Image (cartoon, rainbow, N blue to C red):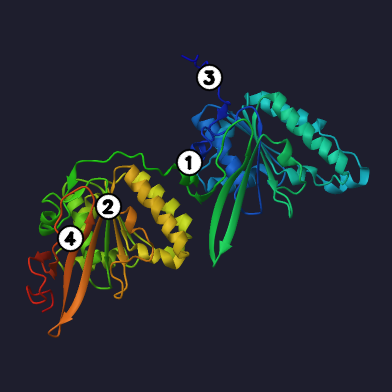
Amino acid sequence: MPESDPVPPSLPPLPKALTGIEGFDEITQGGLPRGRATLVCGSAGCGKTLFAAEFLVRGATRYGEPGVFMAFEETADELAQNVRSLGLDLEKLVEQNLAAVDYVHVERSEIEETGEYDLEGLFVRLGYAIDSIGAKRVVLDTLEVLFGGLTNASVLRSEIRRLFRWLKEKGVTAVITAERGESSLTRFGLEEYVSDCVILLDHRVDEQVSTRRLRIVKYRGTAHGTNEFPFLIESDGISVLPITSAGMEHPASEERVPTGVSQLDEMLGVQGYFRGSSVLVTGTAGTGKTSLACHFAVAACQRGDKCVYYSFEESSTQLIRNMRSIGVDLDRWINAGLLHIQSARPTRYGLEMHLVQMHKLIKKIQPRVVVVDPISNFLSAGTMSEAGSMLVRLVDFIKSRNMTGMFTNLTHSQNPEQTDLGISSIIDTWILLRDAESDNARRGTLSILKSRGMAHSRKVRGFHLTDQGITLSDSAHPLASPAQGD
């Protein structure tokens, strides 16, 4: 029997410092390299200073690590005022001795005239600030202003290397911001080589829709993803969407949840959908997709489950009014705190921004049911492949949290059994609504195209909107039952 290879001893992982920035610590598996310098670079307005400020404030408030913010562009008052919009109270931390903010004015003309430049003064000033509060974190914002007066390339390189080496010797976890260069990541083209970690922030506008993205360019000593991650700047800070976290490891529930239409429950083995599954409702305009989705939302509220309803075509008041006409009272469940309607046009943000917004709201409310009505509207905010990719990640995110997701989709009358977004293959239950004209009247039908893991009816049934909600008739004959408005 061959001797097996010895099991290598496990090596200690690279020490990391949590940033407290939502989503960022997840994609970096623990934050920034502890005791080392990280370069955060990007063009103007991409969020570098806010990223650095949040790293500092979260470190002091959540992890007990005081920090020093040394600014070269903004005064302490300007900086405190600017980051206050993100809920970051630097002034309070300074009062509590958990942070020190120092503004250093660098006069470029004096350096150009005298040719003298020395970091010793900066080291003394920064060292004093670190020692005075026992700082574990340091932010330098921005590098270009600090070295802007240096024209000698060899001196510039030497001083940048000396700065990074000094920070490492001090043992502080540092974030240094830098402007993006024209042909390189940074203006001087050297900082990225001496940094242990490099984060690139990007703010791009495509088809008049702006999107912020973050990419880990370099991270010495640890594996890291190379994808671009969309991020959002809101009143409570920065949120990074960990798109790679979407997976297929979620458990499959055996629990069933009612659809809100008793006859449809019967078609699905009398018990309704699987909890945590995904449901797609397709049909042409006016076939009753929204009505069916609202029935499902109300059924969730009736059993005490929270529901988030994304309405991309109607305002919340319009949706409430329209549903009232078929006997569905949404107001009651909104007032009870169980139903949250979020109305917005998909073109308000880019697709990635929408996904970030939806993640944040779902995490905040923790619903058991999520309705997206309709997903076909995402095509107005991106290409077909972009919208399809975004929806796959959304479906995975909802299922990974054992939430039941219902998605409506507007289809074309020529191909009612085909979706433009091509996501039907990842859906668990697919319901098709159709409309036909007969004897001077339009009548609807409902059929179940598929429902994974359960016995279900293959019958086409009549679909009717009445004053008391949706009813299904046994026969799909167009005149089997009167519809609303007859």
As helix, strand or loop, the secondary structure at mark 1 comes to loop
- The residue most toward the right is 114
Tell me which residue sits at (7%, 73%) in the image: 481
Residue 449, percent from left and from top? 22, 60
Q: Is residue 193 visible?
A: yes
Q: Crowding at label 1, few (<14), some or many (≥20) Cα neighbours within 10 Å?
A: some
Which residue is identified by label 4?
A: 329
Disc 2/disc 4 C-alpha distance (Å): 28 Å
Q: Earlier in the sequence, mark 2 or mark 4?
A: 4
Q: Earlier in the sequence, mark 4 or mark 1?
A: 1
Question: Between tags 4 and 3, which lies in front?
Answer: 3
How many marks are shown on the rendered structure? 4
As helix, strand or loop, the secondary structure at mark 4 comes to loop
Tell me which residue sits at (87%, 46%) in the image: 151
Asked which quadrant contains residue 283, the reply is: bottom left
Residue 83, percent from left and from top? 57, 46
Q: Amino acid at mark 2?
A: Asp
Which residue is identified by label 3?
A: 10
Q: Crowding at label 4, few (<14), some or many (≥20) Cα neighbours within 10 Å?
A: some
Disc 4/disc 3 C-alpha distance (Å): 59 Å
Q: Is residue 454 left or right of residue 201?
A: left
Residue 128, percent from left and from top? 72, 26
Disc 2/disc 3 C-alpha distance (Å): 42 Å
Q: Is residue 330 visible?
A: no
As helix, strand or loop, the secondary structure at mark 3 comes to loop
Which residue is identified by label 1?
A: 22
Question: Between tags 4 and 1, which lies in front?
Answer: 1
Which residue is identified by label 2?
A: 428
Q: Is residue 373 left or right of residue 177?
A: left
Q: Amino acid at mark 3?
A: Ser
